[in-house]
Image: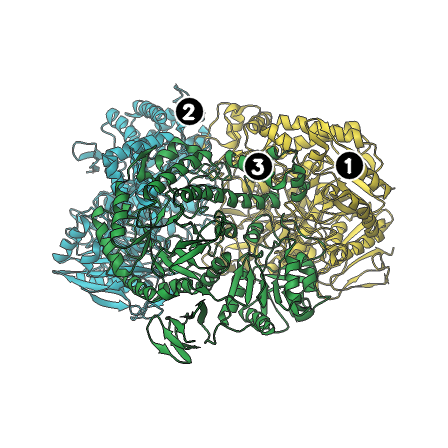
Chain colours: A yellow, B green, C cyan
Amino acid sequence: MNDFISHAADLPAPTRFPWIAEGIAFGGDYNPEQWPEELWPEDIALMQRAGVTSVSLGIFSWGMLEVADDVWEWGWLDRIMDLLHAGGIGVNLATPTAAPPIWLLQSHPEIATVDADGHRTAQGGRLAWSPSSAVFRRYAVRVVRAVAERYGTHPALRMWHVSNEIGNENGRCFSEETGAAFRVWLAARFGDVEQLNAAWGTAFWGHHYTSFDQIEPPRGARTGHNPALLLDFERFTSDALIGHYRAERDVLREITPDVPITTNFMVMNTPGATDHEVWAREVDIVANDHYTIGADPHRHSELAFSADRVRGLVDGRPWMLMEHSTAAVNWQGVNRAKSAGEMARDSLAHVARGSDGVLFFQWRASTAGAEQFHSAMIPHAGVDSQIFRDVEQLGATLTALAPVRGSRVEKARVALLFDHDTVAALRSGRKPSTRVDPIDMPIAIHRALTQRGIAVDVLPSSADLDGYAAVVVPTLYLVDDALPARVERFAAAGGHVLVTYFSGIADVNNRVRTGGYPGAFRDLLGVRVDEFFPLMADESVELDNGWTADVWLENVDAHDAEVLARVATGERAGVPAYTRRTVGAGSAAYLATRPDEAGLDAVVGDLVDIAGVQPVAVVDAGLEVTRRTADDRSYLFLINQTGHERRAEASGRDLVSGESYEGSVRVAPGAVVVIEESR
Amino acid sequence: MNDFISHAADLPAPTRFPWIAEGIAFGGDYNPEQWPEELWPEDIALMQRAGVTSVSLGIFSWGMLEVADDVWEWGWLDRIMDLLHAGGIGVNLATPTAAPPIWLLQSHPEIATVDADGHRTAQGGRLAWSPSSAVFRRYAVRVVRAVAERYGTHPALRMWHVSNEIGNENGRCFSEETGAAFRVWLAARFGDVEQLNAAWGTAFWGHHYTSFDQIEPPRGARTGHNPALLLDFERFTSDALIGHYRAERDVLREITPDVPITTNFMVMNTPGATDHEVWAREVDIVANDHYTIGADPHRHSELAFSADRVRGLVDGRPWMLMEHSTAAVNWQGVNRAKSAGEMARDSLAHVARGSDGVLFFQWRASTAGAEQFHSAMIPHAGVDSQIFRDVEQLGATLTALAPVRGSRVEKARVALLFDHDTVAALRSGRKPSTRVDPIDMPIAIHRALTQRGIAVDVLPSSADLDGYAAVVVPTLYLVDDALPARVERFAAAGGHVLVTYFSGIADVNNRVRTGGYPGAFRDLLGVRVDEFFPLMADESVELDNGWTADVWLENVDAHDAEVLARVATGERAGVPAYTRRTVGAGSAAYLATRPDEAGLDAVVGDLVDIAGVQPVAVVDAGLEVTRRTADDRSYLFLINQTGHERRAEASGRDLVSGESYEGSVRVAPGAVVVIEESR
Amino acid sequence: MNDFISHAADLPAPTRFPWIAEGIAFGGDYNPEQWPEELWPEDIALMQRAGVTSVSLGIFSWGMLEVADDVWEWGWLDRIMDLLHAGGIGVNLATPTAAPPIWLLQSHPEIATVDADGHRTAQGGRLAWSPSSAVFRRYAVRVVRAVAERYGTHPALRMWHVSNEIGNENGRCFSEETGAAFRVWLAARFGDVEQLNAAWGTAFWGHHYTSFDQIEPPRGARTGHNPALLLDFERFTSDALIGHYRAERDVLREITPDVPITTNFMVMNTPGATDHEVWAREVDIVANDHYTIGADPHRHSELAFSADRVRGLVDGRPWMLMEHSTAAVNWQGVNRAKSAGEMARDSLAHVARGSDGVLFFQWRASTAGAEQFHSAMIPHAGVDSQIFRDVEQLGATLTALAPVRGSRVEKARVALLFDHDTVAALRSGRKPSTRVDPIDMPIAIHRALTQRGIAVDVLPSSADLDGYAAVVVPTLYLVDDALPARVERFAAAGGHVLVTYFSGIADVNNRVRTGGYPGAFRDLLGVRVDEFFPLMADESVELDNGWTADVWLENVDAHDAEVLARVATGERAGVPAYTRRTVGAGSAAYLATRPDEAGLDAVVGDLVDIAGVQPVAVVDAGLEVTRRTADDRSYLFLINQTGHERRAEASGRDLVSGESYEGSVRVAPGAVVVIEESR
């Protein structure tokens, strides 16, 4: 059936909603208000030509709907909704709260965010509202109600798209009103201020509070602030933002209980202000915006990691790609165009990892505004362009992939743990080395695994580890007190664990665990570290197995573990760098440094060997492979990230080309093949 | 006759004014108030010894003239004016508004500029006033009137020097009062706010205005603002500054109609806040301040470009160099001293390109104040110094060059178009690549041409193209709708055009032209581009003709042009990089990348070959050559920028050395020769 | 006798105080309030085990003592004071003013510092108070009185530790109240505002004042401000901070005349806001905090320079190291751990240069707070750690060194002049090159001397030069009018002087001395310079003696000096770079560039040869050597900074190992030997 099941926390039980398209949703943000109305019919004809099924509409339209306080003009939106419906295009209709109208910003300047130095955000951008503003909340809820009442039963409506990238520009606010909300949040969290003092360690530098009323957001420079205050302000920020989301969502649910609701996340290379694990529980389907970094030669690996992470937020259920780009963006300094075929590979890589939609920002490239040089489905040059031809081709491919819709990515045998809390904690307070990045080792190890054709589930550390053969804990700085025992039990039962440096260091209050590093995992790993040896920016060492390593070393005492590699050069020569302890029927390895690519490949090779994990399929190097399955069928995605033909062992029919293979599939340079596998 | 003609817009007709000196004006800023009065006679004796004819006086003297609100002390200025007159030194007397007195800044803090974050400029620098401040305007006009009334008939007075480097420190102001002025400016420009909405494309991100009252200056970070808002704020800023200039100028004109008026521009490597094309219409003679960047190995090329650009602002009429430095400045981090002879070469290079004055900041090096390590005509060491000896030598040379005064630089056959609007537009909104700089290609191509001895007129794009054989359009991002047809007519009539990448992209509202790049020039060039391929910082490619290129590539479809070179390496191999279309009797070439020096030399070689443009004279490489002419005479300037002797084909007498040449002139390493050419 | 003599300016005469420990004081900051009270007995037992004699207590405890305005809770501090006393540990008890309680910050926000842009410092760090705040002063004095009255006679009390690193976070304040204090300070300094105008040269840029009331702190960007204003604001800042110190000190002196008083300085690589020369006159014993920079390969040389400088502040009398680190700090980006033995070498290097104490920040590594990753005597891992074992070993060594306590470092034959005024002046106003650093040449020359085993006294330029054979004036930019004659007399009497580039340039008002550089030293050196030639960042030259040099050249006219080396390459070839003039019985050499290490070694070699200065002892390269002496005994410190065994000519018993040597001492790689020399 063409539907999907929401597990949203506000629903009494898992609930079935119709899917927004026939198959894989295809389309993008559509901003008809930027164009003359005469152009709209042509837009819809071109959408049909390209196979577009879905558009996101009205994202920045508040000021054009509510033209002054409680003065409404619906005509243009009525007309385009009708046109889209007539053209067979489904609409993800936005609540327009990402862009408060100028009249609201000017009549209520107090709704704007305030930065850490006390500067109120000026008009002229977007998302300039504080999630803690009661006044903004009142106006936002009113416009959401108006939109929902007007369009809740419109036949073009498929889904609600709440606001846009909540937390992007309004990630942190330091206003007085935010301070009051933060104090309420803290009082709820700690109950008693002495609990907070104890948890935060406020005795340091005399920061002891005698009342919650004394606590302020961490204004000014961050370097002097208590790391626990900083971390809890990060958590509060995510919760404040979600509070706003819920307020909008609740209005929509009340008025249109049958229409699914989402908002677009930003799971990508630079983690933002929101804890997606919490947010994922609040939407009917997770929608993600993803942009690659042109300067990153491994950007397809970051994409794969991010897509696996999104899927991990929803226990492997399908999700949708709400925004990505056909070509260059405009915010990266030098904005690299995509290579030939890269747009299709990126799009299908998301599908390969669970997305049931491929949507872009945006349909037509703007000629004005802050994103006038951001690529789109129709570039400035118009339809006679390589980009639009590629869009049409992609539309055809997605049509052919319709059967894939609703299938699930096959559960992996390897889980990799990743939490927003570690990201937030590493930002909160000075650390031994600024070269330790929260997302570096997760992506590097994920990449080493996927390069071997191994499927990986990227999971919050609270996830159930049952059914996995191996678990990777990659520089997971902050862990709660329960995780070590859970991982220990996993290993004792035959699981195999790989932990990397600077994991398990802090507790949930961002306090360092004492008694020897890596605090929470010391016993599991059979090692004890009394000192870190961060390496300088230009410093590296050789290990005794030939690997080069940088970033980090430690004074590892492998008292209850086998040493697999030691430092061989420099003043730390002899220190263990890679160890393994047998744990019941399983094992726990520790990587105390950052090896080069060959070293990381060997480390994950050890892990999958000992855990007996097989690749998704036998493939040539450079061929990304995943499998999506449904009750009675399975689809093998093969994405050739190289400039040479690659082969995989598989049999079945390629949904993209229609060609059938027996035993061996050839994938042309840069091409994507989706084999409906023979059973 | 020793006079010059002003074309200032406030005069009913071109008007003749006496020139400020016998020949080439020589001197600099003179700040006697920094020194004991006993030293003044020595100053004047030294000026006479050095051949100084002209000083700029009183630039920062407001607080020493108006010592409290409407309390005046004229004595010291009376005395030095008289002394200078007695010594035969002419005075460019400043209106002292560059430095509001402390009492004014403190009694009226609202006159100070406010930055984009709302910080009001603190006292302690200079030019800390907003051009939109009515209070400041009132005080400024009063002091101007007082100065004009007191010194308007003083025999030492030669010219008014209005304020100083207007727009330097006070380039942008974001105060409330500025906001109000900006709204008035916008209302005058657009008439109706819906016109503005349409022109700016405010539908993007919901920035739609319902009233001009809703518009604010682009406060806060610039990245979110509408590019058209940003650009119009740049234009408003220049206009607001010129508004202040006009207010001062009008007072002076009223009181002293016979005294010429100027203000010092800053046409140099980093374009500032003012649109010099507009400003040039408002002064009786254009005066320019020019400082080279010590770290730039091609600084003499930048100087040549800037000087040609100044001349282009006034249709080839003479102008004057109001400030440059004898040696190091103090604001470049490492402040490189000039090499032996560099001061003379710089000075005469300005004269060679049309300047009738060589003035310095300043006469005596300050021992105190913010510029205490800025060089001067008399350094800290005193007159027994290489610098002062060089100054004396320069004075003698300029005396010998007196006949050159009033001659005009020979009109070039090549015009190169350059507009402040493109500078401002490239700063306004995110672009495909931060590596595209508005002044990079103009200087690079100008340099390639002048290295071949070719004369170039650097002109606003509104200039008349008649009489030119070739026109260069170097990365002219923003062009109005009229230019393409004008250039097309130029080519059709036998002219030859060279356009470089990222030209013609935006219209006057900073909106991208659709239908394929390079928008305005697509038809002229016979090419159509559907996508840009900016190159990363460390990226370059080879072309099939052997050139290396970087910064930029595009997906050029040369449907109606000959391809002269293609990319040969990398993933864009095969893409055209250099094309030419025959246009009537002329041609239009397109350079879609940034070649290395050899490549640029070849490109301009192609242009001058096809256009039949000859060098000013046949010269060895490294010899800068220009010609100034008058009715009955001509002067060939030869500046040897190398460390080796160089030769030129010429005949006549060297005004500098007195030596005569027949057929061939030798120029010693680093030397300058000015041949009064035989007829 | 186990005491020391204070020369503090507030005492009527030099005064004898008991020393705080039996021998070398050993210990660190102790923050028991961060730990459960149950842990305190274990702390004291571990201190005893490690040989700790002294702790600094209560530094950040204000808010835990005065829990609300005038509400006091003394219990916990009473108990730990008693426990420490019972354990035999002496206490340096802090006045807790480094951390105003939250209730005070919130009830009196006006006590907080304000930055140059007008932002008031937010709560959450430390030292967030303005020294010019009358309200803060009142509260601070009250808490100091309360602490002094309660613990002034406690038997554990050994010394008062006033506040903490005064001037660190609160180095500069730009509040209105500070402005008023600055004006009072200026009026006292100049008497008449016209004196100030003349001294500051306010005629430049029209900054003339007609009243002290018009003067403001240098708010906003520093680049436009008058360099004399900037410099006097630096001096005022130091004086304002010392004013606060004195207010606290006076209360303590009144209540406890028999207890010595100190505060911890920060003499280290980056000079701070305070003029330690003035401060040194106000404490009973100078205490210093010193942290090395892990990325600096010569960090032990910077340590040696800083320690010698501290000793130079007190005329060679002993001082104490109040804080350093056992291992990594947390504020250097990548925080390098110390190498094996480095903590001991650092500790003993301070003792070798006059410290009678070795104290650390801090006893136990914090698990929370802004410095949770700063190393401590007990690391997070606990006592089973290399760091704690090293601490115990160090304690034993210091116990063995007890006899050294109270001895003085042997007076050197070489004095090196260093003033805070030059540091402050080089920060105040733009200079010819940002590459001229106030501490670079002092450290480089000190290092070249100490590498040869030469003892150096680092002295304020006001110090008596009698008894020295050689004086180094290393890039001493600002000197008063008296110094040149004093140095000239020193040389005429047979002393030998080495001056390096950019010395003697400015007078005490930060004005450039005219008549030729190096202003104040021109006649002494027999050279005259009319222009500086700063070298660009990537530029260097060869000298005709084979040295390489960078940073700086000058146009030296050695009219009355012998040229020892000239520039041999580049466009400045031929310019003298190193000269010497015979001055009476002595000489004065001038180094006009920055040679490489070999060149600097040769320069100091010339100096010590001509001055007949011998090393402290004959030692192998890489062996740091100093001697401390008392009436009847002497101690030779030998610190092996290499990875190889090194030898020295010496005889006596090694206090560290107990071993005796005759004639030749072997020092193991990285080891320290302290020979009680045979007489």
Judge left or right: residue C634 versus residue C89: left
Q: Quadrant of residue C254?
A: top left
Q: Which amino acid type corresponds to the residue marked 2 in the rendered image? A: His
Give the labeled residue for mark 2.
C108
Which subunit holds the residue at mark 2? Answer: C
The image position of residue C454, as x and y in percent, is 24, 57
Judge left or right: residue B124 versus residue A224: left
Label 1 environment density (alpha carbons within 10 Å; few <14, some 14–19, many ≥20): some
The image position of residue A500, as x and y in percent, is 59, 49
The image position of residue B197, as x and y in percent, is 66, 40
Residue A136 appears in the picture as rendered: yes
Kind of element beneath mark 2: loop
Outermost residue toward the top? C71
Q: Which amino acid type corresponds to the residue marked 1 in the rendered image? A: Leu
As measured in the structure, the alpha-carbon distance from the residue carrying label 2 to the one carrying label 1 is 54 Å
As measured in the structure, the alpha-carbon distance from the residue carrying label 3 to the one carrying label 2 is 41 Å
Question: Which of labels 1 and 3 is toward the front?
Answer: 3
Judge whether A356 appears above or below C592 on screen.
above
Which subunit holds the residue at mark 3? Answer: B
* Foreground pick, C278 / C360: C278
Which subunit holds the residue at mark 1? Answer: A
Give the labeled residue for mark 3.
B183
Label 2 environment density (alpha carbons within 10 Å; few <14, some 14–19, many ≥20): few
Q: Which mark is residue A280?
A: none
* Foreground pick, B366 / A117: B366
Residue B578 appears in the picture as rendered: no
